[in-house]
Amino acid sequence: MNSRVSFYSNLAAVAFMGMASVSPDNAAACACGCGVFDVGTSSMFPQGPGGMAFVEFDYQNQYINWNGNSRSPSQNNSDKEIRTTFVTSGVEYFFNRAWGFEAEVPYNFRTFKTGTADPDAAPGTIAAPNWSDIGDIRVKGIYTGFSEDLSTGVSFGFKLPTGSHTHNDAFGNIDRDTELGTGSTDVLLGAFHRQHLTKDGKFSWFAQADLDLPALVREGYRPGIEFDQAAGIYYQSLYLGRVQINPVAQIIGSERGHDSGENAANPVSSGYQRILLSPGIEFHMHPFSVYADVDLPVFQHVTGEQLTAPALFKLIVTYHF
């Protein structure tokens, strides 16, 4: 493949399977868990100096109430639905074979159905605020100089508190973890490795891990630490004319700790562990590439009552330069 492609091109990825929750005896909205994780694809690895710009579209609809390892009656949760579309623009550039950087700017659209905070409303009344705004910007430095084939790399960066986290001031029933931004500055640490499975290089495998550590918090709210991992295989020998077609299969694991703090945090209904399967496909015709997949949960354990999504849909369009 003659175009350089990115370990981090798949921004919003699996943690958008994040869950929204509320305690049965708590009328306020609570933890959404919509963190961000860069899921691997067959186009995830740097190939040397050069750059890329990409736009990613993600969609999820969280409406299935969950408790522990299984579904829970919807009446146990005053939150009923969180429907979100994520649009992320990003750029990555490698100055040489070892050093590069990436910046990602999300803009998100959210509809949230939950019990109303209006004390004069009739019992059972559902509020459905919807809003859109910028999310938390991410910036990373990337190092791939461990080997000549760039098969191993690490990253270090920050999630900045650029996303809106004050819509509850207007609506009165939105928890901090259902906002579009966390209000925290997080340290981001990542690593990846890839290797051919066959001598002809047609089949390859990859693995990666990403850690999100909230460092500087504000207004008494600290989101949970998140640790995500992905492993998969991909095939690189299918062509339709000039278009290279790469099937991708991944398994993804994600764990997030509970929220803490005094400002609308809900430790009894936040935090989760999950495993997802992610079949996908990529199309490459230099200088453009298109990636699409669907992420399907096969195991999830949540703390308390939380809303989950049955699938996350993802599309990424990339221009390499």
Image (cartoon, rainbow, N blue to C red):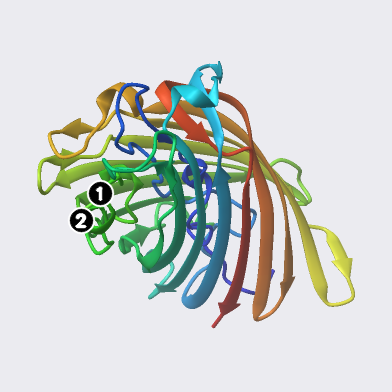
Q: Going by the image, does 74 lie left or right of 116? A: right
Could you tell me how many numbered marks the image carries? 2
Residue occupying the point 46% across, 63% down:
109
Q: Secondary structure at mark 1?
A: loop
From the top left corner, tell me how far across and down residue 102 is, in percent.
Answer: 38, 67
Residue occupying the point 61% across, 44% down:
195
Quarter of the figure that contains the N terminus: bottom right
In depth, the one of 302 and 284 nearer the eye is 302
The quarter of the picture where residue 106 lies is bottom left
Measured in 3D between alpha carbons, the distance from the residue under mark 1 to the one under mark 2, in whole angstroms, is: 6 Å
From the top left corner, tell me how far across and down residue 298 is, in percent.
Answer: 64, 27
Q: Secondary structure at mark 2?
A: helix
From the top left corner, tell me how far across and down residue 73 is, in percent.
Answer: 55, 21
Q: Which residue is denoted by mark 1 in the rendering?
A: 172
Quarter of the figure that contains the C terminus: bottom right
Which residue type carries mark 1? Gly
Residue occupying the point 53% across, 35% down:
308
Does the residue at mark 1 contact the one at mark 2 (Cβ under 8 Å)? yes
Q: Going by the image, does 309 lie left or right of 272? A: right
From the top left corner, tell me how far across and down residue 79 is, in percent.
Answer: 43, 36
Q: Is residue 188 in view? A: yes
Q: Residue furthest right?
A: 241
Vertically, is 270 above or below 40? above
Vertically, is 51 above or below 260? below
Q: Going by the image, does 308 lie left or right of 118? A: right
Q: Is residue 37 in view? A: no
In depth, the one of 78 and 63 nearer the eye is 78
Which residue type carries mark 2? Asp
In depth, the one of 267 and 171 nearer the eye is 171
Q: Which residue is denoted by mark 2 in the rendering?
A: 169
